[in-house]
Image (cartoon, rainbow, N blue to C red):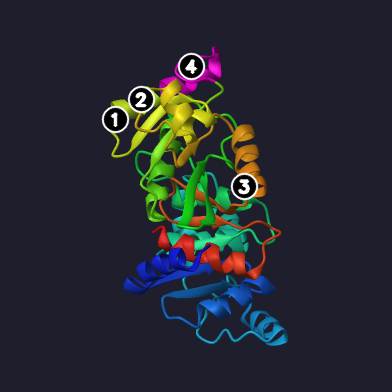
């Protein structure tokens, strides 16, 4: 991500320093990113794992992690309290013994550290799946009041002569075939996330149809979702259903959708399903030379994000800053 965009997020953190849990405390990429974060004072890494193993791994790789907080589930002093809170959160689905055993897993332990206020946010998944990050978050941190789902967005950035072009796209990673109401929630959350990255959202509800030019269930779904969003008087511009060319080309947009505040000028794109979303953002990334940041998880009570298992230390560092700035 261009430096000035990161500087904006770092300035947010400097005004309100935070702590971020890394669930894979011995991973070399996590340690390298942590060492880099520790050169500032605005985001403190909380590394989950055995202290001796984490310190040995850092020393072996040559990373200075002095100042990091290390938390080991096996020696955590508030474990009895944590077990009790988890039993209550799971509402009879797990016994105290089952909760204690589950909390030995770093993804559950790390999520409970956020739930109990020991840290502000969490970044996991360098060595495990998205589901293993999302499941504990849904069970323990839960969705925000009024939200029924967790969704996601990618922020795409491309350097241009006059500055940066920044776009938001969702949901490209979590919800396979969202319903009308889920699309309303996704669009609202993605627009909110876009603002954190300096985008004044103009939201296009994408389809293979523009304003009734095509027919079908998916067209009806996008049109109905758009009407539902407009009925809530959102604080952002939204239009749909709309084809991608009409969303981004002023000439095509105003011809196909005259008078729309979004047609031709969209910067925030909501896809009808995960197929379109995943393919769409990857086309932008690979053929449009955009850098893609995400998936950024939306709709949870606390910022919890997932890393790609193929990530490098720079991506860990970038996603840590993004995650912490979302709070």
Taking the image as drawn, is residue 89 in sight?
yes
Which mark is first along the chain, 2 or 3? 2
| Residue 248 locus on image (x, y percent) | 49, 36
Please report whichever mark, 2 or 4, sits nearer to the chain's N-terminal start.
4
Q: Which mark is residue 220?
A: 4
Contact, mark 3 vs mark 4 (Cβ under 8 Å): no
Magenta residue span: 209-225
Structural crowding at the residue carrying mark 3, measured as other residues with C-alpha within 10 Å and reported as few (<14), some (14–19) or many (≥20): few
N-terminal of the two: label 3 or label 4?
4
93 drawn magenta: no
* Residue nearest the viewer, comparing 307 with 204: 204
Circle 4 packing at 10 Å, graded few (<14), some (14-19), many (20+), is: some
Disc 2 and disc 4: Cα gap in Å?
Answer: 12 Å
217 magenta-colored: yes
| Residue position marked by numbered label 2 in the rendering | 228
Alpha carbon distance from label 3 to label 1: 34 Å
Q: Relative to 309, is 324 on the left or the right?
A: left
Q: Quadrant of residue 188?
A: top left
Q: CA distance from mark 2 to mark 1?
A: 7 Å
Disc 1 designates what residue?
232
Apparent side of residue 257 relative to residue 276 in the rendered image (left or right): left
Residue that carries the numbered disc 3 in the rendered image: 288
- Between the residue at mark 4 and the residue at mark 1, the CA separation in whole angstroms equals 19 Å
Residue 11 rendering spot, x and y as whole percentages: 37, 70
């Amino acid at each position: 991500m261009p430096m000035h965009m990161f500087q904006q997020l770092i300035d947010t953190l400097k005004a309100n320093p935070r702590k971020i849990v890394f669930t894979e405390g011995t991973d070399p990429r996590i340690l390298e990113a942590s060492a880099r974060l520790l050169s500032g004072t605005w985001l403190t890494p909380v590394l989950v794992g055995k202290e001796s193993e984490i310190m040995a791994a850092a020393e072996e790789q040559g990373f200075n992690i002095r100042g990091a907080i290390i938390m080991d589930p096996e020696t955590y002093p508030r474990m009895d309290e944590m077990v009790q809170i988890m039993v209550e959160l799971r509402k009879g689905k797990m016994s105290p013994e089952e909760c204690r055993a589950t909390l030995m897993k770093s993804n559950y332990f790390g999520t409970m550290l956020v739930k109990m206020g020991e840290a502000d946010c969490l970044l996991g998944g360098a060595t495990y799946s998205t589901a293993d990050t999302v499941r504990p978050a849904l069970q323990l941190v839960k969705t925000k009041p009024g939200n029924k789902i967790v969704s996601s967005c990618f922020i795409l950035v491309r350097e241009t002569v006059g500055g940066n072009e920044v776009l938001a796209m969702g949901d490209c990673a979590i919800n396979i075939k969202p319903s009308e109401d889920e699309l309303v929630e996704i669009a609202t959350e993605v627009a909110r996330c876009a603002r954190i990255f300096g985008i004044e959202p103009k939201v296009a509800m994408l389809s293979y149809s523009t304003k009734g030019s095509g027919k079908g269930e998916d067209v009806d779904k996008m049109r109905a979702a758009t009407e539902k969003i407009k009925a809530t008087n959102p604080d952002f511009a939204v239009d749909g259903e709309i084809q991608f060319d009409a969303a981004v080309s002023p000439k095509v947009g105003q011809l196909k959708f005259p008078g729309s505040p979004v047609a031709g000028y969209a910067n925030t794109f909501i896809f009808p399903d995960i197929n379109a979303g995943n393919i769409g953002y990857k086309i932008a990334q690979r053929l449009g030379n955009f850098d893609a940041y995400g998936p950024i998880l939306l709709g949870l009570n606390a910022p919890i994000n997932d890393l790609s298992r193929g990530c490098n230390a720079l991506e860990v560092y970038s996603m840590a800053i993004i995650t912490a700035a979302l709070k």
